[in-house]
Image (cartoon, rainbow, N blue to C red):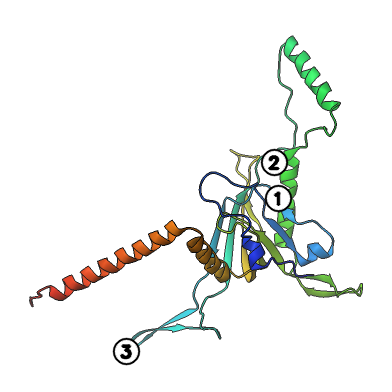
Amino acid sequence: MANTAPSLAAALNLANQLNRGDGNIGARIPMMFYSDATVARGEPPIALKVNPHAVQFRQPKRITKKNTQAGTVYIHWSDAKGSNNDILDLAFKGRTGNINTKKDAPNQTSFVGDALQNLANFVSANSPGQGPTPNQGQAKLFTWARLYQLTSAPVLDFLPVGNSGNTRRSRVLSHILYRSPLFPRPIRFSGHFNQVLEFAEVAEQPWLVEWSFGFTVQKTSPNLTEITSYLTSILTGADASFANTVALANEQTQELENSDRRAQTSANFKSG
């Protein structure tokens, strides 16, 4: 599969300014879910019309704790770059929305109201580009079913080998094209689902199902460290008041540390 990961510049796209909290925001773009197998079969990615209402990022440190006679020892398992960060895990929680596939019953109206409704239906039916309103419940239920299939799909499948037309049983990677206020441009997380889609049906809300699943990230394009470093430099350079605020906060913190140090040095301690 061709590498379609956006570059760092494209991921943050300087041509589009970051939101300043003034209420101006672009069109909501859903997250995309797909895998190497779905791409090979020509299936479109799963687009969540409403993004998950909670996504938790968790990346522990590779640290081993050992108790010795001399005290507690912490062993940091670092890589060639000196980093001891472990694999990133994502936890998604969301809702299906109304999955009722039945059409609403017609409203009870008066004779005049029925005439006006019939007129509106006639105008709508004869207007160019107009058609019956799609059933949103069916679309949401279909999205939930595809998401379940994706999370429960086998980790080994037959994938094409280059352009030869042959297939080979290979390991399947899943991908999430992620967007959020923290990351205003797409980031691709590649890895595997660490659990099948979890859900529960509740009698009090039969047409609304809450779901959750976990995702283990093996590769991020672009890297989160690069993105946060880039955001820091852009935000600091793009807004002088922001830089002044940071500098003032650093000065105040340093002054507090100095005054605390002077207070400890000049304090008179008496043995009890």
- Residue 165, quarter of picture: bottom right
Q: CA distance from mark 1 to mark 2?
A: 9 Å
Of the residues under marks 1 and 2, which one precedes in the sequence? 2
Q: Which residue is mark 2?
A: 99
Residue 151 placed where, x, y %? 70, 61
How many numbered discs sit on the rendered protein?
3
Seen in the picture, residue 97 relative to 253 is either above or below; the reply is above
Amino acid beneath label 1: Trp
On residue 70, which mark appears?
Answer: 3
Mark 2 packing: few (<14 Cα in 10 Å), some, or many (20+)? some
Q: Which residue is at the far top?
A: 111
- In this rendering, position of residue 188 left or right of residue 23: right
Q: CA distance from mark 2 to mark 3?
A: 62 Å
Amino acid beneath label 3: Ala
Q: CA distance from mark 3 to mark 1?
A: 55 Å
Mark 1 packing: few (<14 Cα in 10 Å), some, or many (20+)? many
Q: Which residue is mark 1?
A: 144
Q: Give SS at disc 2.
A: loop
Badge 1 vs badge 2, beta-carbon distance below 8 Å: yes
Please indicate, yes or no, whether residue 194 appears anywhere in the rendered image.
Answer: no
Please indicate, yes or no, whether residue 42 appears anywhere in the rendered image.
Answer: yes
Between 142 and 243, the residue placed more toward the observer is: 243
Q: Give SS at disc 1.
A: helix
Seen in the picture, residue 224 relative to 84 is either above or below; the reply is above
Residue 121 placed where, x, y %? 80, 23
